[in-house]
Every structure is written in C-alpha cells, then in structure tokens.
C-alpha cells in the first residue's frame, strides 16, 4: 500500500500538463482524480527500451533482454517523448508491474499513433492474430491471468468485442480500425472497470500490470506504432444524481 501511495503522490506532482491536450469533449478531472502512470519523459534514454519497463515473450511470458525483443524505444518529437515500437515478426509484450484498483481508478486514458498495420491482421484468428497497437491490463497471477486488451485492429471494425484465439481469458475490445487515422495521434478514453465487468461477468481484482503490444509474429509484416500519456482517472460524478439532489432541495442548477 505504501508503494502504491508513493506512486500516486509522485505522479500527481509531476502531472501539471500534457504534451498534447485531450479532445475538448473528454472529461476534465480535478488533480486529485488523476493518476498519470506513464508519460515516457526519459530524455536520457532516447533510442532505448525504458529502464522501468519489462519485456516478456512466449506463452509463458518470460522476461527477456535480447536485443531483437527490445524493439520498443523512447523517441522524441517536437520536445515530446513517447514510446515507439517497430518490428517485422516480433511479439514482445512491453509493460510495467503495478497495483491499481479499478474500483477507484475506473477510467483509462491514453493516446496512440499507428504508422503501419499488420497485413490482414485479425485478432480473432490464430493465423492473423496481430495488432498494430494494443494497450493491455493484466489481472491476477502470472499462471492464470486475465487480460483486458484494447486494440487498433487492421481489419476488425471499431466496437468489436472478441477474445484471443490463443487464450480465452484475454478479452479484446477494438477501439480503432484500419488506415483511416494512421499517422495521427488519437486519444482514447474507456471505462475499464465497466468493460471488465461486462466481458468477464465479475468485479476485477487489482491490475497487476499495464502493458502495450505491437506485434506481427503471425503475419510477419511491418508494424509500427507509438504510445504516450497512459493515465488512470476516477469516474466523473453522476450529474443526474446531482441534478436530482438540487431539485429535492429546491436549489437552482
């Protein structure tokens, strides 16, 4: 718990501004309702795999430090640092261990940019199960984990919900699809708590790891994507309840 409190305090102090602002229609939380997990502001690590992240490969998700697996690197553009991934045939999960309670931090927000999609990638089929970009929340033990996976798919339509053809405990939600927005930074905001309850049918345990995945081990094609500003938020207040309370009290809105 002390470790988690230190993470919260440190990230809140360092979260005065984003490198790029979210869309105006996004919920704007108060400072104490924001947990900035990662902004990749590591200028001393340009061109390198982030030192506080782990790389894991294979169905057992073993840690790796092999150069060919570390294709996620810190890059800089117009003064902004971000995580960039580029590979042909790689399948490394890059992430960092955390302990995050989705009952408190229900919302997840980040931005990503895809440059190149896996050829005919389709996350619901074994032979083409590659994603240009994915943000993953991992729950439970490493032996029997559950994973909530948000993807930018090459072919599956946005809004599709499916599961990994390799692991039924990995539920996939498609947020972006195809080439329409490639080359652009796109902001995403999801209610991860409600998504978990819907796809798994129960309340989530603690998030044990937050990870990203850009892979093409099945299609063996060029994939390239960028990630930045991974942030957890408390759920916004229910305005309908506030309005009802004002009416009971006879107050003006």
Image (spheres, rainbow, N blue to C red):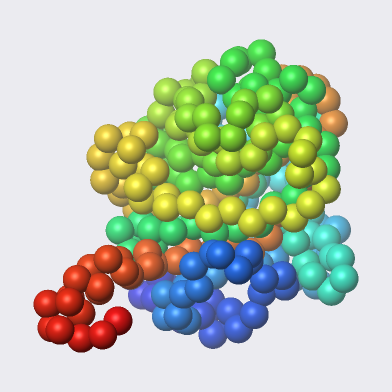
Q: Which residue is located at x 35 percent, y 47 percent? A: 194
Q: Which residue is located at x 64 percent, y 56 percent? A: 187
Image quadrant containing the C terminus: bottom left
Q: Quadrant of residue 103?
A: bottom left
Provide residue 150's location: percent of width, then percent of height.
Answer: 55, 41
Position of residue 174 in the picture relative to residue 203 (left or right): right
Q: Quadrant of residue 1?
A: bottom left
Q: How many marks?
A: 0
Position of residue 74 in the picture relative to residue 203 (left or right): right
Provide residue 16's location: percent of width, then percent of height.
Answer: 60, 83
Q: Quadrant of residue 235?
A: bottom left
Q: Is residue 89 above or below residue 225?
A: above
Q: Is residue 43 above or below residue 221?
A: below
Between 166 and 196, the one nearer to me in the picture: 196
Q: Which residue is located at x 72 percent, y 36 percent? A: 132
Q: Which residue is located at x 42 percent, y 50 percent? A: 192
Q: Is residue 23 above or below residue 157?
A: below
């Amino acid at each position: 718990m002390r470790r988690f409190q230190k993470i919260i305090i440190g990230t809140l102090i360092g979260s005065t501004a984003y490198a790029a602002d979210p869309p105006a229609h996004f919920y704007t939380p108060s400072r104490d309702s924001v947990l900035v997990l990662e902004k990749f502001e590591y200028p001393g690590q340009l061109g390198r795999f982030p030192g506080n992240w782990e790389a894991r490969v294979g169905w057992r998700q073993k840690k790796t430090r092999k150069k060919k697996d570390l294709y996620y690197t810190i890059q800089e553009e117009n003064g902004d640092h971000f995580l960039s991934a580029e590979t042909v045939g790689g399948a490394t999960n890059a992430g960092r261990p955390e302990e995050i309670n989705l009952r408190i931090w229900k919302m997840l927000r980040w931005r990503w940019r895809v440059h190149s999609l896996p050829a005919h990638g389709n996350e619901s089929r074994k032979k083409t199960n590659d994603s240009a970009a994915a943000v993953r929340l991992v729950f439970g033990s490493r032996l029997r984990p559950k994973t909530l996976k948000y993807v930018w798919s090459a072919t599956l339509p946005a809004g599709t919900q499916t599961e990994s053809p390799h692991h039924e405990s990995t539920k996939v939600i498609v947020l972006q699809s195809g080439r329409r927005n490639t080359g652009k930074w796109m902001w995403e905001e999801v209610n991860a708590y409600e998504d978990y309850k819907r796809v798994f049918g129960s309340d989530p345990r603690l998030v044990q790891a937050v990870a990203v995945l850009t892979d093409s081990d099945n299609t063996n094609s060029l994939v390239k994507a960028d990630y930045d500003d991974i942030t957890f938020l408390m759920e916004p207040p229910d305005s309908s309840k506030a309005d009802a309370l004002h009416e009971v009290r006879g107050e003006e809105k």
